[in-house]
Amino acid sequence: MNMILKPVGSVRSPLKDRKQAPKQGSEGAPAADIEMLPEYADALLGLQAGAQLVLLTWLDRSDRTALQVHPRGDETRARRGVFATRSPDRPNPVGLHEVRLVSIHGLRLRVEPLEALDGTPVIDIKPLI
Amino acid sequence: MNMILKPVGSVRSPLKDRKQAPKQGSEGAPAADIEMLPEYADALLGLQAGAQLVLLTWLDRSDRTALQVHPRGDETRARRGVFATRSPDRPNPVGLHEVRLVSIHGLRLRVEPLEALDGTPVIDIKPLI
């Protein structure tokens, strides 16, 4: 089966590496821009500033071989399976981010808060329900 | 960049095709089983019955070329970009499902409600936060 993801855009953020980034968007993450690829312009019809969205990203700096981690990287805590955590290290490192759409200008979406790093590929955008 | 998803399990459900399936889990979807692949057993450590989870699936019967759709397939409604809808037809058909973990026995997770079809590949499980 073809389960190959296609990037539809990418993140432009002041966050450049994992050490800088909060673990969750709600923990003080900044606003960021999503730069969409031109071939997906038509897929943005109906998106309006103020909307609550779920952004899906590909966390490309993750370790896909990890099956267990210490929660929040805290080695004093017992290991847990990655499916019982939100660690970016997991077999399919798809990031889920609840964001507010601050503005949309052509192919550029301003969103907040977003803990994803600069350059992270965006794979999907969905309205929050 | 390698953005190839690996199945980590698959859905066992009474729902066999899109016509049968509700559009959202909250619209009367049944319980279903997730059969995990043995190589991911260690990644389940810490998952407990009663937990609220987000299940990510690969909606393998979707149209990846669709950029706009009629919301809920209703042709009397104006077309919208797929990123402004929850249509399964989209460039990267990753399904997001909020479910309750009813029980876990070895590699088999019982969850509800789930509108994904029988045989749908599961790509990730995350705790809801």
Image (cartoon, coloured by chain):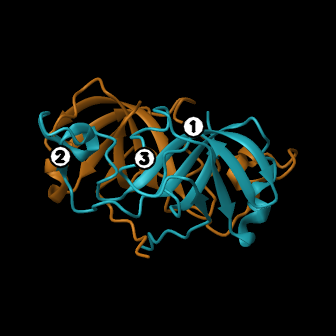
Chain colours: A orange, B cyan
Q: Does the CB distance between marks 2 and 3 fall below 8 Å?
A: no
Residue for badge 1: A24
Image coords of residue A2 (percent x, y): 40, 75
Quarter location, residue A47: top left
Quarter residue A13 falls in: top left
* Residue A3, quarter of picture: bottom left
Amino acid, disc 1: Gln
Task: Please tell me whether residue B38 is drawn above or below residue A12 in the rendered image.
Answer: below
Image location of residue B112, percent across then percent down: 62, 40
Q: What element does badge 1 sit on?
A: loop
**In this rendering, which labeled residue sits more in front, label 1 or label 3?**
3
Q: Mark 2 and mark 3: span between their CA atoms?
A: 34 Å
Q: Position of B5 compared to A125: left or right?
A: right
Image-based side of B8 in relation to A58, left or right:
right
Name the secondary structure under disc 3: loop
| Dot 2 crowding, Cα within 10 Å, few <14, some 14–19, many 20+ | some
Q: Which amino acid does label 3 sit on?
A: Ala
At 63% from the left and 58% from the top, the residue drawn is A89
Which image quarter holds the N terminus of chain A?
Answer: bottom left
Q: Is disc 1 in contact with disc 3, using a CB cutoff of under 8 Å?
A: no
